[in-house]
Image: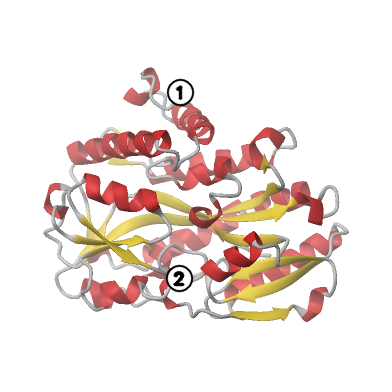
Amino acid sequence: MKLSTTLLPCALSLACIGTASAAPSGKPDARTEGGSQFCVFDPIGSGETHRAMQDYALAMLKKGHTVQLKTYVDERVAVEDFRTGQCDGVMATGLRTRPYVPFSAALDSVGASTIVRNGKIDLKASYEVVRQFVNVMSSPKATDFIVAGPYELAGIAPLGAVYPFVNDRNIDTLEKAAGKRVAAMDYDKAEAQLIQRVGAKPVAADISNFSTMFNNGLVDVIMAPAMVYKPLELYKGIGTKGGVARFPVVILTGQAIIRSAKFAKGFGQDSRDYFASQFDTAMAVVAKGDREIPEKLWIDSTPRDNERYALLMRQGRVLMAEKGFYDKKGLKLIKKIRCSIHPEASECTELTENW
């Protein structure tokens, strides 16, 4: 599973799912007959994600584990089939896998990985937060973190920073977002509440209309990783007046979740080790996605605003955790990682997220 060249230029991402249709392929991969069944979301059905997971299945086979793949073009259906037991494992975004292993899904909480240093976004350090979290989750000693009842985390893949795409460059501060229409995924209740907190209007979106709503002018703002800029033709929604705010709201991940009892002993650890080994090559794809957005489209915030946004995200993150949307223990670990990377941050002397 070479998560580098095959890592979902469109799949598994927050906005990419806007092009997916509703039906699963329903066909097991002929190369891995028998064994445990894995639901795989690929909006094309037999595209890059499917091929990446074929490589993954072959890597697992070399470890003595047989995995039978079932590819879906709708993430919602893939996760639902996993929920109802039709699949033994699933590969989907952390936003979707949160109900199963909340601790690891905390990584996909708003601003959890974002580091602002001296008023500037430190994207390299932000991704280092993700790397260190993945390494912790891959440790054989992480059982308390990666097992939740019958479910187990089987790996994490970075999918890139999620940026605000706007149809008007004048929406360059949170204050100017007040009253604007912002797409909110209907399954992520925390997102809608966070949008309301800044005075914007959340507009329910789903996997069938997320990107088209933006491209057709039905919403003013969407959140999406850079790698989907070209595949989803988001330049149509940006038009001549829009742009992309260079502020990572969240670093999105793909997370593999399994029912432990359905897999041979040791599978989960072998799987986590494999995903962790592919982190650097996955990041090469993420960096390529950032480069594909024309420089003229990027909108940079002032140092003061960057610091302010980081604080607002932290406050929103704490609020959502108190409401039960985000896992507190997961956020506590992520804060420890952030502060080990940027100990000078003001949050490191505060009690927030120290549940």
Q: Is residue 354 left or right of residue 131?
A: left
Cβ–Cβ below 8 Å for labels 2 and 1?
A: no
Q: Which residue is found at the position 64% from the left and 75% from the top?
A: 71
What residue is disc 2 on?
17
Q: CA distance from mark 2 to mark 1?
A: 34 Å
Q: Residue at x 28, y 32 (%)?
A: 118
Say whether residue 353 is visible.
yes
Q: Splitting the image into 4 quarters, where does residue 179 fall?
A: bottom left
The x, y position of residue 140, in whole percent, is: 75, 37
**300 or 225: nearer the eye?**
225
> In the figure, residue 32 lies in which quadrant?
bottom right
Q: Against 221, is 18 above or below?
A: below
The residue sitting at 23% across, 44% down in the picture is: 197
Q: Quadrant of residue 240?
A: bottom left
The residue that label 1 is drawn on is 354
Q: Who is closer to the viewer here, 189 or 44? A: 189
Mark linked to residue 134: none
Left or right for 183, reference 284: left
Q: Earlier in the sequence, mark 2 or mark 1?
A: 2
- Can residue 223 be seen in the rendering of this structure? no
Q: Is residue 261 above or below residue 346?
A: below
> In the image, residue 340 lies at what x, y percent?
49, 27
Residue at coordinates 69% horizontally, 73% vertically from top-left? 70
Along the line of sight, the residue nearer the viewer: 100 or 51:
100
Q: Amino acid at mark 1?
A: Asn
Type of residue at label 2? Ile
| Label 1 crowd (10 A; few <14 / some 14-19 / many >=20) | few
Secondary structure beneath dot 1 equals: loop
